[in-house]
Structure formats: structure tokens, C-alpha cells
Amino acid sequence: MSGDKNPSSFTIGNTAQEKGLDYVPECYVVSPSKSSSSGTEKARIPTIDMSRLRMNGNKRSIAIEELSEDCRHRGFFQSNDVYNPVRYGTSLKNGADKVQFWRVFLKHYAHPLDAWIDSWPHNPPQYREKMGKYCAQVRNIALELMGMVIESLGISPNRLTPQIDRGMQVMAVNCYPPCPKPEMPLGLPPHSDYTCLTIILQSSTGLEILDTDDGNWKMVPELHGVLQVHIGDHFEVMSNGVYKSVVHRATLNSEKTRVSIASLHSLGMDDKMETANELIDEQNPKRYKESSFKDFLDFLANNDIADGKHFIDTLKI
Ligand SMILES: O=C(O)CCC(=O)C(=O)O
Ligand SMILES: [Fe+2]
């Protein structure tokens, strides 16, 4: 690739971010209206206290009510639960990308753990053990939160239990090397996750969310030991649009490598997420078609997220 500033695709190990180039090839440049230079204001992210959500009685009802407000207005919150930290690629569309992104990632399935762990990388040697522990713990938190989010909509918390229990957990371990011109490319383009919930851990700032109140990008602060939680497309569907999935993107910096670990929680591969009947009436007709994780994978195979195509838009009635 050296000397070639605008190749249409790269082989693994040859991307600009992996090679640490001191310039940004043209195929990484996003149009100025989409670039990251505007996103400096900090997002106001509500923090939920899991211990209050785990209480009984009145205190819990108040915490569930607050959770409902956070989901309704932001679709994004963070949990104060502390945890112990820990498909390789660079391309969104298996080398067919029109625009490249400054990211190296590993993605793998994580639930049930014993079905997948043997397929995870051997290196670094402790990866399986540490990531295995993290995946199990973060899934427990996700299950608990999903139940609470469902309850906060006034739906019985057990309603989706069987589907959630056999649900999928996908881990995306994202690495964003320092970029010589961090305002030109993006680490990841604006997108919402297909999930019910996504839980993110980031090593430093770079994650930004679109504030639907003013249409501006807001930076998600990095707080040590704090997990960031997104509402995904499938919870937007379930809630009949009362809760919206969060549009987010990853921005870059010129100084240090940023790592984020996203744990993506959804129903099983073929289980369809439907809008809850309790949230459909004459004033609020059903707004979304049902869909599964498999439907999302089919969407990905046929569409380019970097072109601004959103899975949730294909589900709107
Ligand atoms: O790096 C980040 O903070 C965002 C990662 C993300 O959005 C994803 O993996 O879907
Ligand atoms: Fe995402």
C-alpha cells in the first residue's frame, strides 16, 4: 500500500491504522459534514444506581420510574457497577467498503460461553480466561437491566424471559490506533446497534452520541469502572418507539490507542422481536415490523452502514 493514497481495499495488516501511517489516505476521509471536529461538548449521561434497582418496594418503584425517564429521553445511560477489565478485521463490509474506518476489531460470540470460548484467540494467553469472566459478568448485568427496562415500560418483566435466556451475546473488541489527522476519518460511522441493549466499556473518550434535542454530537465521558449502556433497535421495536435506539459513532485522537469493548445483547438468531401488545392502541398503532438478529445480518450483507443506511428504518411501518 505504501505510496498509494487511495486504494479501494486493503489486505489485513496493510491498513493505514495497522501500519501507523503518518498521513490519512483519501479513502478514509469522511465528508466535512460527517467528520468529528464538531463533537466536543460533553453529553449529560444519567447514571443509574443498580443497588437501588435491586431494592424492594417503594425505592425500587422510584428507581424504575427514573430508568423509564432516562430511556425515554436519552436512550443512553451508564451503570455504576464495577467489573474486572479485559472476527479480527478492519473493514465493515469484508473489503467492499467505499469509505474505510480507522479501526481494528475482534468480534466473537460469547453466549453460551462453553459453546464459543474454544474458538476465541489463543493470544494473548490470558484472553480467554479474562474475557470469559467479563462476558459472563456483563451478561448477568445485561439480563438484569433488560428485565428492568421492560418493566419500566409497564410490561411484565418476565414477558421476554425465555427468548432473552436463549439470546445472543456478541463481543466487539475495538481498537482505534492514534491517527495523524483525527478529524478526517472516523473510527466507526454513525449507527445504532441492532440489539436490545449494548454495554460498552471504553479506555478513553471517543464515543459520541447524537443528541436528538439539538442534533449535535455529544462526547460520552470516560469514567473508570463505569459501563455505558445503549438502547438498541430491538428495544425501540419492542417499545413501539417510546424508547429510541441511540445513534453513536467512534471518533479518534492523535495521541493514544483507544480500546472499547462492546457487549451486544439480543434475542436468539431466529427469534423475532415484536412490539409489545400493551403499547399498541388506537392512538399508538403498531409502528414497527418484527425482526430477528438474522434479519439484521441479512440487512448488513446487502447495505452499507457507512452510506447512512439504518436497520431500524427498514422496520418502520
Ligand atoms: O468504540 C466505541 O465506543 C463504539 C463501538 C460501537 O459502537 C460498536 O462496536 O458497535
Ligand atoms: Fe455500536
Image (spheres, rainbow, N blue to C red):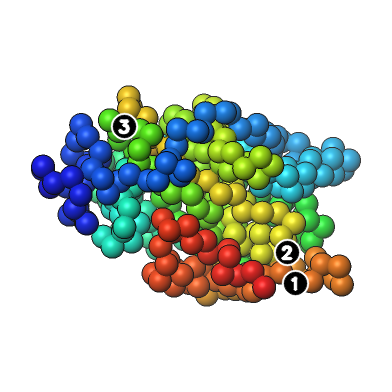
Spatial CA distance of label 3 from label 2 is 41 Å
Which residue is more in the foreground, 126 or 108?
108
Q: Is residue 58 visible?
A: yes
Disc 1 crowd, CA 10 A, few/some/many (<14, 14-19, 20+): many
Query: Which amino acid does the dot numbered 1 rest on?
Result: Lys
- SS for dot 2: loop
Sequence order check, earlier mark of 3 and 1:
3
Q: Are marks 1 and 2 in contact (CB under 8 Å)?
A: yes
Residue lying at 38% horizontally and 60% vertically, measured from the top left: 116
Nearer mark to the viewer, of 3 and 2: 3
Q: Is residue 160 above or below residue 32?
A: below
- SS for dot 1: loop
Sequence order check, earlier mark of 1 and 2:
2
Disc 2 crowd, CA 10 A, few/some/many (<14, 14-19, 20+): many
Mark 2 lies on residue: 240
Decide if residue 67 is on the left or right side of residue 93.
right
Q: Is residue 265 visible?
A: no
Disc 3 crowd, CA 10 A, few/some/many (<14, 14-19, 20+): some
Decide if residue 123 is on the left or right side of residue 277.
left
The quarter of the displayed image where residue 77 is located: top right
Residue furthest left in the image: 2
Query: Which amino acid does the dot numbered 3 rest on?
Result: Lys
Mark 3 lies on residue: 181
Decide if residue 187 is on the left or right side of residue 157.
left
Sequence order check, earlier mark of 3 and 2:
3
Residue 124 numbered tag: none
Spatial CA distance of label 3 from label 1 is 45 Å
The quarter of the displayed image where residue 282 is located: bottom right
- State which quarter of the image contains the C terminus: bottom right
